[in-house]
Image (tube, rainbow, N blue to C red):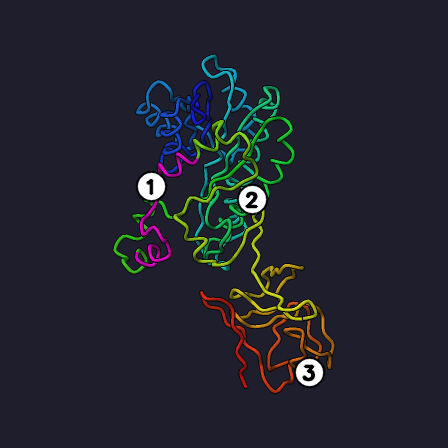
Amino acid sequence: MNAFSLHNKTALITGAASGLGLAMAKCMIVSGAKVIIADLNGELAQATAGTLGSQASWIQMDVGDTAAAQEKVDVLISEQDIGAIDILVNNAGNHCKKPIEEMSVSDFESVLDVHVVGAFALTKALVPHMKQRGKGCVLFTASMTSFLGQPLVTGYSAAKSAYLGMIRGMTTELAVHGIRVNGIAPGWIDTPMLRKAIEGDDERRNKILGRTPMKKFGKPEDIGWAAVYLASDAAAFVSGQVLVVDGKPIRRRIDRLLMYGGIMRKRALKLHAKDNCVVALNDIASGDIVWWDEGEMVACSSVTLGHKLACEALNNGDSILKYGAIIGHATRDIAMGEHVHSHNLASNAIAIFHHDDAGYQSEEKA
């Protein structure tokens, strides 16, 4: 038995006439699936399906036209040579790259209408059919921006981040019906879009590769094979997950940052049970979730690695405890999550906590 086989399965892939959608279609066909190429550009979808052979069919589909989603799905399923759709890949997307002050509300909404509302409407239309059959697989093409912010693409970042919540929510609701829901977050993939973006810009190219331990861009088929895995019986017990396919730059860029269910937390260390401050093991920005073994909080100050944050609210005059010992006193009220340093701490010395690969060391600064 080949657990990775997609024989006797049919996949509907949106935005599949080109790019990563086409790569997923090709890999699924090689794995035995029938694939429906759905794309806004009907002529391109037809031409693409023609190059893929008898296992491919096509449909013109505007994912943003949510009112037509149910009709499109019903028409496809009623066709004799399709009959059922086992796999849905929500891959279609659009983009708007503008500064916040230049991005209109309609610009923002247009991105969410395709990525989020459109994907929801199509999934909603297909779920009853999957429930009736007692099985199904829904995939979302997420992004590095699902985890990391990028400038000028607020709408896109919001949409891709929304996928994390949709995946978790749908999983908890649909798992009992045998329907699995997962996502794929591609990194820097060698596509015409990427080549155009870095053409003549060696500095940007080298910067991207410098953050990628494998020192190369991914190939479209890397995403295609990830989709095959998640759609196959090899992933029969995998649901609610986002598979990051990026050569590891996300983990490198946010060193020591742990992700639980899509929520990112920065690590801190409480050196003694009695301490009322923790030591940052990452550079931490205001608003980050900071966690240590006994608890977590939201940082209300930005601090660099090695500096202290109050892990409880402190009043003016309260003792500041580190290593279980008093290192000074608060010179004003200090909020939980606030930087504890010379601006609000009276002491003879400020303890700065350093980290190296050999371990942790503290050093007293006068």
Specify few, some or many for label 2: CA neighbours under 10 Å numbering under 14, 14-19, or 20 or more: many
Pick the front one: 17 or 265: 265
At a point 46% along the width and 29% down the height, the residue shown is 61
Q: Position of residue 127 (x, y in %)?
A: 59, 27
Q: Secondary structure at mark 1?
A: loop
Q: Earlier in the sequence, mark 2 or mark 1?
A: 2
Pick the front one: 364 or 298: 364
Q: Position of residue 326 (x, y in %)?
A: 68, 79
Membership of 9 in magenta stretch: no
Q: Amino acid at mark 2?
A: Leu
Q: Earlier in the sequence, mark 2 or mark 3?
A: 2
Q: Secondary structure at mark 2?
A: helix
Q: Which residue is mark 2?
A: 164
Specify few, some or many for label 3: CA neighbours under 10 Å numbering under 14, 14-19, or 20 or more: some
Instruction: Magenta stretch: give its range.
Output: 206-226
Q: Secondary structure at mark 3?
A: loop
* Residue 117 to residue 259: above or below: above
Specify few, some or many for label 1: CA neighbours under 10 Å numbering under 14, 14-19, or 20 or more: some
Q: Position of residue 145 (x, y in %)?
A: 48, 50
Question: In what quadrant of the picture does the N terminus appear?
Answer: top left
Q: Amino acid at mark 3?
A: Thr
At a point 54% along the width and 28% down the height, the residue shown is 68
| Rendering quarter of residue 134 | top right
On the rendered structure, is 263 left or right of 63? right
Q: Amino acid at mark 1?
A: Lys
Name the residue at the top extreme. 80
The span from disc 3 to disc 1 (Cα, nearest Å) is: 56 Å
The span from disc 2 to disc 3 (Cα, nearest Å) is: 42 Å
On the rendered structure, is 141 left or right of 218? right
Q: Which residue is mark 1?
A: 219
Q: Which residue is mark 3?
A: 331
